[in-house]
Amino acid sequence: MASSASASASAPPPPTPILNTALSLHRTLTDFLTVAIHTILYTRSLYPQTTFLTSRAYNLPVHQNRHPAVCAWINSAVTSLTPLLSSNAAKRVVIVIYSPQLEVLERYIFDISRFPVISEKEKLTEFADETRGMSNITDVEEQLRATIRRLEYAGSKMAPLPEKCTYTLAVELRDEAEPPIGHPQPWVPSEPSLQTGEKGESEIIGRDLGGVRSTPVRLVAAGDFVLEAWIEEGKAKFDGD
Amino acid sequence: MGSRLEKNSASVRKRIEAHTFEDEEGDEYEGSKFGGFDDYFRRKKIKLQNLDAEIRSSSLGNPKIFRGVVAHVNGYTQPSLNDLHHLIVTHGGVFMQYLDGKTTVTHIIASNLTPRKAIEFRRYRIVKPAWIVDSVEAGKLLPWDAYRVLDEGSGQRQLAFESGKIVSQASTLQRGYKDQMNHSWYTSQVKSLAEGIADDDTPPTWGTVTATSKSTAYEGGSAEPTGMGMESPCKAEPIPGESLNPPGSFEVTSSLEDALMDAAMEEDDARYQLGKEGISQRVETPREASPVVTTASLTGNSIIPGSPSSKPISPLIQTETTPHKRSSKLEDVSPSKKARVLTAEEHNAILLADPNIRKSSTGNPEFLKQYYSESRLHHLSTWKADLKSRFQQMAAEKSASQKQLSKPKPGSRCYIMHVDFDSFFCAVSLKSAPEYVDKPAVVAHGSGNESEIASCNYPARAFGVKNGMWMKGALKLCPNLKVLPYDFPAYEEASEKFYEAILDVGGIVQSVSVDEALVDITSLCLAAGGSAGFGLSQGSIYREQEKADSIAQSLRDRIKNATGCSVSVGIGGNILLAKVALRKAKPAGQYHLKPEEALDFLAELSVKDLPGVAYSIGGKLEEIGVKFVKDVRQLTKDRLITVLGPKTGEKIWDYSRGIDRTEVGQQVVRKSVSAEINWGIRFTSQAEAEEFVQKLCIELKQRLVDQRVKGRQLTMKIKKRAGDAPLDPPKHLGHGKCDTYSKSIVLGVATNNAEKIGKEAISILRSYAFAAGDLRGLGVQMTKLDPIKPSSNALADGSQRRINFGAPAAPPLGKEIIEDLIDDPVTPKKPKTSSIRRDESKFEASDDSDPTTSQKPKWVTAQHLDNGDPIHDSPQKPRATPIHPAAAITRSNAADQSAKKFLNLTGTQFIIPSQIDPDVLAELPQDIRSKLMNQAKRSSMSRGQSPATKSRSQSPFPEAPNRQIPPDLDPEVFESLPEELKAEVLASYSSNTVAHGTRNLLPQSPRKIRGLNANPKKTTPTKKRGLLFRGRNNKQEAHSTLTQANFVTNKKDAVEQANDQATDSEDYVSETLDPEFLSALPEDMRQEIIDEHRRKRLAKKGGLVAPAATRKPRPSEPVLPGQRKLQLPPRERRPTFTTQQLTTLPQLRDALSAWHEGFADDGPHPDDVSALERYLKRVVLDELDMEKVVGVVKWLEWLIDESNESNESNGSGAWAKVLRDIKEHVQSAVQERGLGRLEL
């Protein structure tokens, strides 16, 4: 189950607190994803690199696209993640890069299946055991910084993408989660080839999952913030070669 | 400063800087049209800028330090507007004559702002003119905030930089005219001019001399601070009589001295004004003083050219001519230098190192006593209080007979005498030095500059010397003043005679002071007049007045004869008039202010001559245009009340009309009792300060007792050295400039208990958290006084009723009972008393006032202590089995305490108080604290017994336990038996109890068990029975057999009991996980235990329901007290490699390196390889950390490559194969996750 986001701008969230509530975990994640998306867009040259500004995140120079529409899209996409996170529906967050022919070329996967499952009502309740040794936000940032850095490195090592690629943000839901249907509906079902689930009915379903080659990025294990990131490169990317 | 302001001012600046002036052809020089004021004004401004442009162009050589500054001057400044304007413009700034809007300028220059403007400009840069001047002088733009005019209010702390650190400090902005004058530009100009003149006089020396004087001053400050600080006070005291016997060149010297004194005074003032202790300021001061000195020396020069008097320009030479002055100056200077290095405490410590000073300050334990025995003020006040109480007593004695006489009907004529010695102290002192009677003489405690004049005679007053003046000033007014010492015995004698005479008059006497009294002679006069004080019979009035005058005259004569000193008497119709009349009577006369002239007389007085009116009230009245009493009469009462307040206003209004309703002899009810010391307070530590407060409270208590009152409100007054005051005040050991703080607390009940007061006072002191060294004065005051009823005889020191538990056991009231359980085996009585005492205090309801019974248990339990002592293991012990319930209970109490005694777990030989002040506890080091806590815990446990058990310890059969009477015997009967029979009975019982004695060490009674059941946790040792406590609690383990019985009634325990007995101990562990114990365990074991613990707890919670709850992703936790926290499920354990539980990449690398190195030649063992493969697979699939796997594989690859490169060993092939295998394994694992192949 994957979906893409529609746009609705929102104010930047307040600074992240230490990771001792579900809310802070989610906020740290969304912040991180924002940075990560910009970084991917930059390293994979989805937009001209001159349209990026250098900025600082986690004490690391990162690139941020300066086009307002791009920023707004990313922000809104990441913001629409929040309800899915707080309802514990999301399992993975994936950034998918498509070729001009809409073949899946690369997938950047951020696996959050090991985030603690906490009901929405408890999102402000502090964790009992002092965030398990991750009481300092800088420790967390250290790991996030490393992840961004590795993402950048891995992205720059991969073969360049063809012109006019496009991308989207997708979310893989947990098996037991309800699909986010309703009005307004920020998320739409993704193409069958990227849908998880039973493969029985059709060849297509889940075809592009997994890819041909994967590149591990990093495992972030900051207290209860456990996130594995890796990159998958799809078949379509190597078909041309 | 917002950007808005910057924008506006920047645009103004640009506009003006771009402004050029070519010629007078511009449009601004045209005539303005009718009504064109705007135009006119605009042009005016342009023309002004034209002027500036010209100035600017003509001063290109100056540094453009004010570039970017747009300034406006507000109000009077020094230097003047014109000068500032010029300075700013010539240094590249822009000057605005007219403030078109606050944002058009960057800085507003003002010396002072009106309050309204201060509010209006609050957020703008208001700078003192000195900023401009100093900046120009420094050649650079100085930070403006050092020259703020406005601050954030006196209490507001500000951030500042000090020696590289950010500090928060209270703003110490000084302002005022004097400040401005001292810093003023003109003053410095004048100064430099004066210096120029001085230079001409002694051109070769000046510069060098100043330099040396500076350096010596520094050295004096830093190298030998103590010597200077301590000796100088003595030095500073000039030799008495020196000024009275001036040297030959009197004229010059005295004028010089005056000048120097002025200079010194100014210096002092300057110091206070500036409140800075910086070097620059100190260096400045001699300069500031110099103009005065210079003028003096100039006049000196003109009289005796070339005389040494021309020298005093330089401070050093000045000291040569007047050594004592120099030293006093040095004294003033050196401490301020020290302040840079020393804290107040250290300073005090150094100060107190001198034994003399130590003796006369709080460093001396006897200080308080000494202080009160030596303090003059204290002497006077207590003396007066003594007198007062004496005369009140006398009056009370007489009152019986006088009552009817002394209560004339309202409206009748009155005659009040105010009798007062003329300069009492001085007159009495002069008796021993009659040669000075006609010369100016004063009484003071010394002729030092700082001594205060207590009294001066009339010749001295002619010079303008006044009481309360400082010697310095007095000597200036009258250089040949004779200083007389105090002569208290003589005063006392004179005073006694004085009062004797007054009392003999027979009227109602009210003592005002030792030398002053009010006498109501109405009754005497009316008797002489033969009227009742009414009517207008001229004759009787005349006779009455005649009588009054004659009484006064005879009184004066009598006192003159008795004491040799003259008194003055004022007579009037009321106290006010008598007092006013006395003014006129002085000296040595009498004046009767008759009713008909009273009003006129009063009218001509200045308001300040009215009693009770001085600067404050006088000043207020002057503000509303009142100077004389007659002016007051023009005002309405309401007006006066609004100006002065309801009480004072009405009083003054009455006074102006000669009305005074107070009566002679009216007893003023004492409203407060206090003890305060503001001299010699020098502490080196907080403990010292607190001890002193305690002593002060004892003094206060004494006074309360003397006054027979108790207070309900305690006020603590603290004087703290002001932030800008030097460590050494001008007066030796005085308090100097201080900030005064006071805080009151209302005590629940009236008390005069020194300890309680002391405790509160100390806590107030602590609440301020002042540095002890900065304390300069301490005072305690009790208000809301309640008189002690004479009936409450012995309990004069506590208003709360207490139950009397019998005299012997009662310790001194209010004393903390120190339990001596450990150290006093010789007198077992003591611990007993305290334990009973404690019981009593806890269960006061268990009223047992019979002294005999309270005696008994004391002895009994003391015995018990020995018997119950487990160390003895006496054969008697097992006998205890079938015992009287009361015995059992008492025994258990005793056992508790004896256990304490025996084990001495506290590990200290010191007595540990049973009631611990948490404050104190917090201050203690960790180890002592933990001991105390342990002890407290244990004692509270022992106390946790049910009330029933406690009260039983006071049971009427207290002796039973001692003898261990078998329960089936009636103790009363037993008691009545003769001693040998008792022994026999006991012996017979003991034989059959031995058998099952061990089982029930603590014998049970049904009562007791119920009591325990109510609170099983506290009494049963289960809590302590963790694995680690096993050995230690052996003794108590015996109890556990007893507690087993409890499980029946307790649901939770029932569950426990259901568990296998074998798992008993584990169960206990899980019940209360000891965090320390846990942390000592390895990670996985801990996890296991915690899991186990949780499982068990959940099982317990739900009774014996299946532990399904654990399967929930987030098990709901029992609600904890305080904030609820979310218990997260335990994280999955990471797969580990080898038995060493390696998980992190560096660890794995190390392990791999070691592995590879060890088997480089032989090739790896297949088991190891498969272990690694298994591990890596688990990492991929379970830990989900592919990156680590890649890292491991790459590391291994690198290792192999490395060894291949270095030498072709035979194992390399095997290794390469292994690597391939591993890679394949990893790939398959990744594939299992449904991912594409990793690039390895």
Image: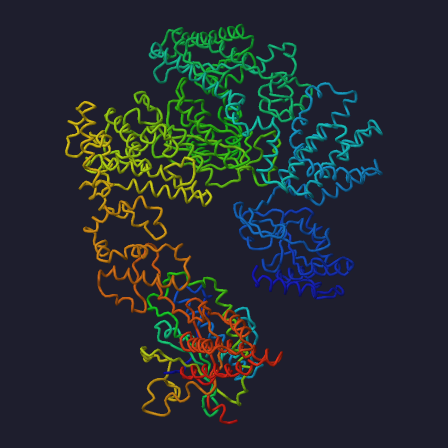
Q: In this orientation, which residue lies closer to the viewer: B846 or B464?
A: B846
Residue B732 drawn above or below residue B1068: above
Q: In this orientation, which residue lies closer to the viewer: B910 or B524?
A: B910
User: Residue A16 at x, y = what percent?
Assistant: 45, 66
**Quarter of the image where one finds residue B449:** top right
User: Residue B586 at x, y = what percent?
Assistant: 55, 15
Q: Quadrant of the N terminus of chain B?
A: bottom right
Q: Is residue B196 left or right of residue B575?
A: right
**Quarter of the image where one finds residue B1205:** bottom right
**Quarter of the image where one finds residue B1110:** bottom left
User: Residue B226 at x, y = what percent?
Assistant: 65, 33
Q: In this orientation, which residue lies closer to the viewer: A210 or B1004?
A: B1004
User: Residue A6 at x, y = what percent?
Assistant: 41, 81
Q: Is residue B609 left or right of residue B956?
A: right
Q: In this orientation, which residue lies closer to the viewer: B419 or A168?
A: A168
- Let me know if residue A65 appears in the view: no
Residue A111 drawn above or below residue B736: below
Residue B656 drawn above or below residue B41: above
The residue at the point 46 percent across, 41 percent down is: B767
The residue at the point 69 percent across, 35 percent down is: B224
